[in-house]
Image (cartoon, rainbow, N blue to C red):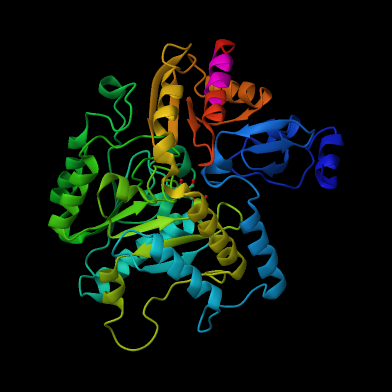
Amino acid sequence: MNKRAEAGVMQAGLEASAFWMPYTANRQFKKSPRLLARAEGMYYWTADGRQVLDGQAGLWCVNAGHCRPKIVEAVRKQVAEMDFAPTFNMGHPIAFEFADRLAEVAPDGFSRVFFTNSGSESADTALKIALAYHRVRGEGQRFRLIGRERGYHGVNFGGMAVGGIAANRKMFGPGVAGVDHIRHTHDLARNAFSKGQPAHGAEFADELERLCAFHDPSTIAAVIVEPVAGSAGVLVPPKGYLQRLREICTRHGILLIFDEVITGFGRLGHPFASQRFGVAPDLFTVAKGMTNGTVPMGAVFASDSIYDAFMQGPEGIELFHGYTYSGHPLACAAGIGTLDTYAEEGLLTRGASLEAAFESAIHALKGAPHVIDVRNIGLMAAVELEPRPGKPGARAYEAFLKCFEAGVLVRYTGDILAFSPPLIAEKAQIERIFETVAAALKTVD
Ligand SMILES: Cc1ncc(COP(=O)(O)O)c(C=O)c1O
């Protein structure tokens, strides 16, 4: 065990720690911390040496499993060779190499990559590219951005504005002007216990037509959605829904942005969700699995026609946007090691061969205490629990704790347990995840 972690365990608690933890009940956590100290393959080890099966790929990101040798070695080599170099008016070969490698795995027609450092930055970058794209084409009146209820596009102002999870928005003022939302696609009454895409709800896309009529479609720049909403609890798009969104956007000259921060890099059994659903966006965002979570990085993929539109204008900087760390050498090295690992092990499509086993393992939870829905697609899934009266979220939190005590890491959001194991998972490990959940639910009131 590493010395700092050891020190953490030996400490009576972390109540006085300087670390203001993100998306965490700090006081509650610091009284009884859960510390992860080491990781390899499908497992973490806690600071006190317990092995924990990772049912969540870290935080939807460690798609190839932990501490994979090619990635570790690539980062080690790069940090010793060149730690940092700017990409504003300068370049370094590895950034160009990684962008070209990404374009090779991207869906046809997406040969341009803008580097960011996170999913949140990718969302904001995509929204800005959409606004600027219309402007360079002489349609600067398109300023509106449309998101969706229960959508998550990170925590920066643009992503927060188009995002649709109330708790993420309510403390932070009026946000960005000109934003509206279509309704979410969750419909338990008609779709509970669906396997794969639910049958009902394609018509929810028609809300976009309603907003077009209301605002005048020529004022709308872009619509952004996650192909499968992840953070709000794995909301799988109804059959035909994404196709309809695409049609409406095309009809009105609105750009369609897919936020593939979770669904990108093999989560749905295809490299990208757009390939699984057969619906092409105009821009899409990635992060997480792009570097297997090893070094923070994100990107926006732009269709060729969008990039080309920027390259028609006067000489000079075409897009006044970028981050100090766009194309950071360590992140690029991690990304190349990640793509090599994905390619060697066929991980970008491995989910397709595991999906049936994953589906039947999770649907075995139908009938378990408190379970009101089970849903899945690719290697992402959720179990929704009936909230305990007057205490929303308490049941899922307790189930999460019990699973962790039993050696399985899952995620919870509200009263939903979410699952996204690394794409290297074996069938027996998948079964263990859901058997642990079943046992945990029996002990939760
Ligand atoms: C769909 C989606 N977009 C954006 C983000 C934000 O990514 P980050 O936390 O890297 O900023 C997330 C994070 O979970 C996400 O799931």
**Residue that extends furthest to the bottom in the rendered view of this protein:** 315
Position of residue 263 measured from the top left corner of the image (x, y, whole percent): 41, 46
Image quadrant holding the C terminus, namely top right
User: On screen, 221 above or below 276?
Assistant: below
Q: Nearer the viewer, residue 350 or 4?
A: 350
In the picture, measured across the screen, residue 170 lies left or right of residue 238, that is right
Residue 439 found in image quarter: top right
- Residue 40 visible in the shown view: yes
Main secondary-structure element of the magenta-colored stretch = helix
Q: Is residue 302 left or right of residue 160?
A: left
Q: Which one is in front, 223 or 290?
A: 290
Q: Can residue 359 be found in the magenta stretch?
A: no
Q: Residue at x 67, y 32 (%)?
A: 52
Tell me which corner region of the image, top left, top right, bottom left or bottom right, holds residue 404: top right
Q: Which residue lies at the image location 20% right of the left edge and 70% below the top edge?
A: 139
Whole-percent x and y of residue 435? 55, 19
Compared with 14, 340 (above or below) is below
Residue 255 percent across, percent down from the top left: 25, 59
Q: Which residue lies furthest to the front in this view?
A: 344
Residue 414 makes an appearance in the image: no
Residue at image point 52% right, 37% down: 421
**Taking 430 as reference, is 148 left or right?**
left
Segment tinted magenta in the rendering: 433-441
Give x and y (percent) for residue 327. 53, 70
Q: Quadrant of the N terminus?
A: top right
Q: Number of labelled discs?
A: 0
State which quadrant residue 5 falls in. Answer: top right
